[in-house]
Image (spheres, helix red, strand yellow):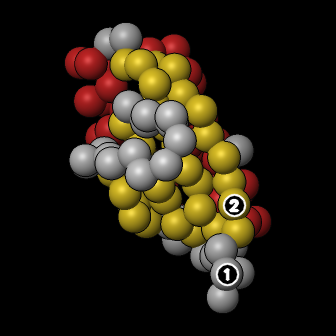
Amino acid sequence: MAALFIVNITEIRDPDRFKLYQAMTPPTIEKYGGRYRVRGGDVSVMEGDWTPNRLVVLEFPSMERLKAWHSSEIYAEALALRTEIADTNAIAVETLD
């Protein structure tokens, strides 16, 4: 069963270094079979008061692959950079087959 990693980037404190994070991350995602489904773009709030700033959605073949990527050594440097320069909220959720 596929799994989604859904991230709302609420604040980017260092846009220049965030560009470095954006360059570092895609190869790590691909190595674990993941792909971008959403990477920024327009967001329209349809219900409620949630207003994402920058929404990113990644899809992985399984929750196991998603978790393996997130805790991997190849993503560790990028993750450390992101947590230093940006505030985020993230969840992982399995999809329906």
Where residue 24 appears, as percent x and y from the top left, is: 37, 40
Where residue 87 appears, as percent x and y from the top left, is: 51, 20
Q: Nearer the viewer, residue 49 or 61?
A: 49
Q: Is residue 12 left or right of residue 3?
A: left
Question: From this viewpoint, is residue 71 visible?
Answer: yes
Q: Residue at x 51, y 34 (%)?
A: 49
Cα separation, mark 2 vs mark 1, equals 10 Å
Where residue 58 appears, as percent x and y from the top left, is: 49, 59
Q: Residue at x 43, y 36 (%)?
A: 52
Image quarter (top left, top right, bottom left or bottom right) of the N terminus: bottom right
- Residue type at mark 2? Val
| Residue matched to label 2 | 93
> Badge 2: how crowded within 10 Å, few (<14), some, or many (20+)?
some
Residue 74 numbered tag: none
Q: Residue at x 43, y 34 (%)?
A: 51
Q: Residue furthest front?
A: 47
| Residue matched to label 1 | 96
Q: Residue furthest right?
A: 64
Q: Nearer the viewer, residue 6 or 48?
A: 48
Instruction: Label 2: state its secondary structure.
Output: strand
Question: Toward which corner of the image does residue 60 lie, by quadrant?
Answer: bottom right
Q: Residue at x 33, y 48 (%)?
A: 44
- Residue type at mark 1? Leu
Q: Is residue 27 left or right of residue 41?
A: right
